[in-house]
Image (cartoon, rainbow, N blue to C red):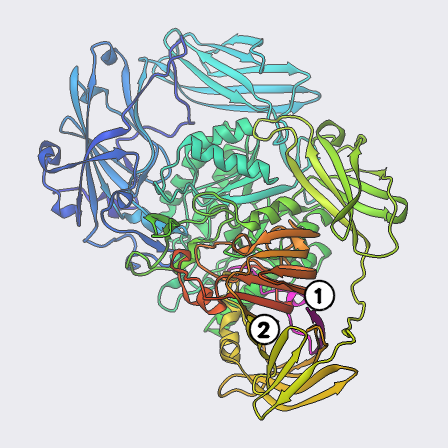
Amino acid sequence: MELKRYFEDPAALHIGTEENRCYYVPEDTRGYKRRKMLSGDDWKFRYYGSWQLVPEEFWEQEAGMERISVPSCWQMMGVDGHQYTNVKYPFPYDPPYVPDQNPAGAYVKRFSLTAEDLLFRQYLNFEGVDSCFYVWVNGKTVGYSQVSHSTSEFEITEYLREGENALAVLVLKWCDGSYLEDQDKLRMSGIFRDVYLLARPQSFVRDYMVTAVPEEGKGRISLQAEWEGEPVPVTCRLLDEADRCLAEAALPADGTVSFTVENPVLWNAENPYLYRLEIESEEERIIQTVGIREIHTADGVMYINDRPVKLKGVNRHDSSPYTGYVISREDALKDLQLMKEHNVNAIRTSHYPNAPWFMELCDEYGFYVIGEADIEIHGTTTTYQGSQATTFGWLAQDPRFEEAILDRVQRDVIRDKNRACVLIWSLGNESGYGRNFEEAGRWVKKYDPSRLLHYEGSVWVTDNYPNDASMLDLMSTMYATPKWIDEYFTGGGEISPYHEQLIEALTDPKDKLPYVNFLKDHLNSEKKPYIQCEFCHAMGNGPGDLEEYYEQIYRYDGFAGGFVWEWCDHAVYQGKAEDGRKRFGYGGDFGEYPHDGNFCMDGLVYPDTRPHTGLFELKQVARPVRAYAKDLKKGLLTLENRFDFTDLADLVGIRYEVKQNGETLASGELEVPSVRPGEQAEIQLDYTVPRSGNCYLRLIYLQKKDLMLTREGHELGFDQFVLQEDFGMPLSVGSGKHVHFEENEREYVLTGEGFTYVFSRITGTFSSLKKEGRPEIREMAYNVFRAPVDNDRNIMEEWEKAGYPHSRTKVYETGLEAERGQVTIRTVLSIAAPGIQPYLRLTASWTVDGEGKILLNLEGAKEMNFPFLPRFGLRMKMEKDWDAVKYFGFGPYESYCDKHEASWMDVFETSVDALHEDYVKPQENGSHFHCRYLELAGENGWYVTGRDPFSFNVSKYTIEELASKKHNYELEEADHIAVCLDCGQSGMGSNACGPKLAERWQFNEQRFSWEMLLQ
């Protein structure tokens, strides 16, 4: 097919399209939409491996075409093949050119119009097409457009006829714009958002901007409209949520009108009050919801409606494992409801404008939004000898792409400029910095000075370009360490380890000094409000560092908040496995090159939006109420209100409970006093603190009334306080009954009342524990390894070098002593991997009494030139029928030293199956932290307790099985129950993309002791 090669011309962005305008769908004066939906399942489609193979006038050859639904992604329809790549471009880097073997999808849609329809001007709208497309109507060329996630509008009045009409669309997989759309996501193609016709009068209001701000106790709402054709009589009405008309005025020819609202209700995420503006002519009406609110910065702090506000945010893609980029309103509402239920109040649209109607939902249900342009140019950094510090800004500084970058920013801003939810514009993501972004930023601040402007890429320097970030209102980074953030706010202004590593990677020393100097100047300049536009990488079993960051968000007034990366795992549904589990595919599952594996599986919810335990962690650390102990013996606590606009007494009720060893001693409801946002108040509870046992007070915060997405009784979070703990008490054995023993060179055999234990002198642990002749534990070993979690992907290289996954035990000496009817086996041993020196030296004493109780006392010493350990403890094989689990520790969710905010100390009863967290890519999961005891019930039962808190894991899958399989549906159950008892386990962190695991969460003690009792 002959095509004008607009797709390789950065100056040919939109041919035949209308000028940008704000998003709205007009209706007639009776309230019916003036929209003829062309979306549906009756489109004809054919896929071609290259656009050059598409026949001329393909719309006349429908016989060879298949039916397809629009919107859809053609990869989800079974053609072309999926691909996931994060940074690398899926084609050679040769801008503005793309491969000649550029796949194409040919679409044909037939629709009918009446003579009455043709009395109106007809506008063809595409809300999203990836990556570019050509349009014909009734065989006539209409035009061309690109920018995948923005609306393209064509007037096609002159091409239409009464009766049947044929719309033909040719979509290309790649274009020069694809260099600007290198977002971290599955790469898909096609018409993935709605297509429709809008019927408009001969003259009408085409575009408008609404500003609605509080001013001296009143609300000022201004409309600046732009006409298409000659001005016609238009009435503007302002109504409140009760449909009461507050004001009415004719729109003058200059398109400007203003209203004043007395005692306005201001819009915010906690109370998203919307007025309604009607713009009505004789032939059509436009409805625009309006939120009165204001945002500004002062002295390094961000304010909304003169209140300092914290953004408790997530990054969100339009994503579905079943439909790809195609998102329904039901899908979006499910996302928003889950976010509200988990205390999320802000969304960054990563890394493109989400569906246009999605912003209406954010207005309605109350979310603060960073509206981000459809730009990511990360692939420049993975070119040959490229890096973020040397090649990141290639296209940001390339004059050929100046217009394209500005166009993408303008299309984002103009489309969503009337949405109250949008507080901040973002120029894009991970695209370096240079003149093209500076000019785009200056345009934004001139066009819309009412909002703030953000762009994290301004911290990157390429070819010593002198970055100008003066038009940016926020200081933004990704994955900064807590230490770096402290230094930023306390005046240190030092370079983060993240940037230090990149500076070290610079091959030319002369490049390093300018980069270092720029960063220091940037950090030590006048302080701007700070956000982490990405932090706490939520991949797999994580994140593990949320609480520390949230402590900082509230410690520093200038820390405006952060956006967890990211909301949802990205995957493709591939049907069900034989056992009924859903099969989700990620990078590499489709035979593609290049790909980035499961790096797209990095969300707070699974692909089908089931919450990860990480989402429960986020909910808890972002809870709107916090309590602090003042005098626990007297029941005195301090309540802090972390809402930004809501008094606690208006929304929150508190239920409390006092438990000792899992038994309730006291409980009740509290009358919550008036506590204004950001303030504190004292409360008192009536209870008695016991003198012994493990006793805890828990306050549960409950919603007192229905809101739009959450209901009365919804739990907002909780706080728990230790009233009394008896950890640290020495453990002992001794029954008055005798243990008999036999020994040989390889083992000791111990027998007593109903038991036979075999201790291996080769491994330094028991090899068999039998009760009443029945095997119960048939293997025991020292254990330092775990199935790597996604956030271990960087430290895993060091663990491999140290040989941790391949470790073996060497016993140097073993001795047995019998005294007072007990037997004590003392052993000295080390742990090392083949070819590597020992990294652990252990001295262990195992004491067994006549009833079969086993007391372990262990002293360990670690070689500190080795990396920190994944864990240290014992792993055991128990009989398969052991399924009932009872424990006293952090539950009910999996919990770790740095990931247990969502759990609380209590006695929990569960099953082995329920303890498993079924991550799509298998990994360490289901552990429970800070435990007092563990009971495992089979035919008999085992009880484990520690002098100090311990962790445990009970699973039907071995560590090796979890570590070796790529997908959860591939897992095969072991012929035993795998039990891990841990003296300690390193935290989860977020180092898949975030900072290294903090030292305090590393199991890296030079010397440690462990005392456990098994009975």
* Residue 1002 on the magenta span: yes
Q: Which residue is mark 1?
A: 945
* Residue in the picture at 69% in, 17% down: 263
* Residue in the picture at 68% in, 66% down: 1000
Between residues 204 and 627, which one lies in front from this camera angle?
Answer: 627
Q: Which residue is mark 2?
A: 770
Between residues 481 and 848, which one lies in front from this camera angle?
Answer: 848
Tag 2's secondary structure? strand
Given this view, does label 1 or label 2 mark the residue nearer the observer?
2
Tag 1's secondary structure? strand
* Residue 573 on the magenta span: no
Amino acid type at circle 1 is Thr
Quarter where residue 749 is shown: bottom right
Which contiguous range is marked in magenta?
Answer: 993-1015
Question: Marks 1 and 2, Cα distance to the nearest angstrom?
Answer: 20 Å
- Judged from this view, the residue extending furthest toward the right is 634
* Residue in the picture at 63% in, 68% down: 982
Between residues 485 and 47, which one lies in front from this camera angle?
Answer: 47
Q: Earlier in the sequence, mark 1 or mark 2?
A: 2
Between residues 711 and 515, which one lies in front from this camera angle?
Answer: 711
| Rendering coords of residue 279 (x, y %) | 46, 14
Q: Is residue 246 above or below residue 757?
A: above
Residue 562 appears in the figure: no
As drawn, is 320 to the left or to the right of 293?
left
Amino acid type at circle 2 is Lys
Could you classify mark 1 by the number of other residues whose Cα lies within 10 Å: few (under 14), some (14-19), or many (20 or more)? many
| Rendering coords of residue 206 (x, y %) | 39, 20
| Rendering coords of residue 533 (x, y %) | 55, 48
For the N terminus, the image quarter is top left
Mark 1 near mark 2, Cβ–Cβ under 8 Å?
A: no
The mark tally for this picture is: 2
